Amino acid sequence: MNDIVKQLNNLARLKVLMDNSSESARAILAEGEADKLQSQLSFSSYPEIELRWLNFQLKNLEVDDSGTTEYERKEAETRHAAYTLCAFRCKDCIETFVENHTQEAKEEGSLKKLIKEQHESIFSQCLDRATREYLHNYHNDPSKPFSTEAILSQATAYYREKMVKEALIEFETITFIEYYARLKGNVHRGVLEQQFIEDRLNMRERYVAHGYTLATKDQDKPYDLTKFRTKEFNKFYESFWQPEPLTPEHFKKEASRFLETQSTTDTTFGTIFYLHFKGETELFTAQMAPIFSQAEEFAQLSVPAVSTETPIPTEDKKLIKLRKIVENYQQYLNHHRAEEEKTYPDRDHRAVEQRQLALATIALVANQSEELSPSVKQVVKNAVEEIQKNGPTWFERSLLDKILDVISLGARPLYRLFTSQQNPAEAQLNQAATGDLPEDDNPAEDGSSERPQ
């Protein structure tokens, strides 16, 4: 759950940024955050296959070994062998494509804990995807309110879609294994059904030192873990998404219809369903119940409240430096406000407000960012340009000053230009716009803020 908590905190941070920035800044920040997430996204199905590996191990542990008759012992033995084979295929796939795979569990409690964590990992993947897509769209239309609720809703929809398919793939295999075990317990029944299941699951009995076990039937035939074994289950899965939204009630209705249809068809597949699942809709829907329950739990997630006044932790030294520069420049403005009003009595109050808003934008992105990313640099650059554009000008000086400047034939303005020094806080802020942050941590608090003419 730690990853999901971090993602929710990140969404809260993004909402603060978007809710308190201009549209142009939102577009830049949204694009930067989307690009950052794009490099982290994974669209592989290996998290689901790892979940299946854990579930097959759990099914193996749940096999009833208490039977005393030969029929019951053979049935249990077949179940163990089949679930072991399916779990092996999953693990083989995972270890082939996932580096440093170390997840192991031997007993039921540990397996259930890992299964819960794997569900959280899959939702985390879905949340990253939903966030990235929302940011990409928001970059193109930053005028609308930033909705974390829309992101969480889409993430839950992605999770539900992934897990419904995964649960049905597992259920299809479990269906065949359970019925196959019943047939193996009674060697005089269901030869055609046994062959049908062996073909679908690509397995066969093989004699080893102390008896028979199950092994892969055709080693040259690739076993795609992402697909259904039969077209019937595939069509059943595809029927969910149109036209009604998938809910537990909708699933139960479709499951009942599917079972009834399949159990009356004159095929080997239909025979399996007629003998194994006739009238047992509840058994079918039980496989899906945890999925809907978990999806509902994720749907209740919300982002925490974040204050714009509290900087988020960062180890980026340049970003820490930027925060200090903004603080120093704000102190400089506060200190020189009276002097500026005296020197520039005709100061445009709207320009003063725009300068303060631009500085607030820099403070916001500096305090609510984890690193000095290219998008943050661009927002800072634009805001600094806005500060410079709205600085005091010669035209805002007093009428007497302007008359004396004209009478002096420009000597007074030239004298001011060559004798004035730019305040270090202002100089550092201007330098920060280039992304090249200065090293001086203690800027002085004097000098002029008048921009050149």
Image (cartoon, grey):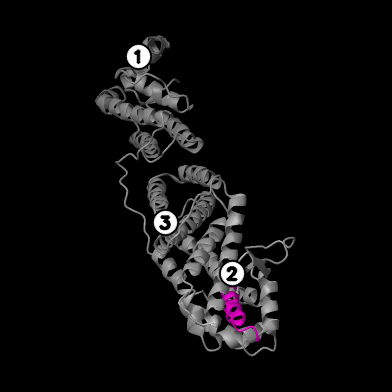
User: 241 or 322, which is in the foreground?
Assistant: 241
State yes or no: discs 2 and 1 in contact (Cβ < 8 Å).
Answer: no
Secondary element at image label 1: helix
Q: Is residue 370 above or below residue 202?
A: above
- Whether the magenta-drawn stretch holds residue 26 is answered as no
Q: Identify the image quadrant of residue 339.
A: top left
User: 303 or 221, which is in the foreground?
Assistant: 221
Which of marks 1 and 2 precedes in the sequence?
2
Which of marks 2 and 3 precedes in the sequence?
2
Residue indicated by mark 1: 404
Q: What kind of secondary structure does the magenta stretch mostly adopt?
A: helix
Start-end of magenta stretch:
173-189
Residue indicated by mark 2: 82
Q: Identify the image quadrant of residue 336.
A: top left
The dot on residue 148 is: 3
Other residues around mark 1 within 10 Å, as few (<14) / some (14–19) / many (≥20): some
- Residue at 49% in and 46% down: 30
Residue 218 visible in this rendered orientation of the protein:
yes
Among all residues in the image, which is located at the extreme right? 220
- Camera-nearest label, 3 or 2: 2
Quadrant location of the N terminus? Answer: bottom left
- Residue at 59% in and 72% down: 173
User: 417 or 26, which is in the foreground?
Assistant: 26
State yes or no: discs 3 and 2 in contact (Cβ < 8 Å).
Answer: no
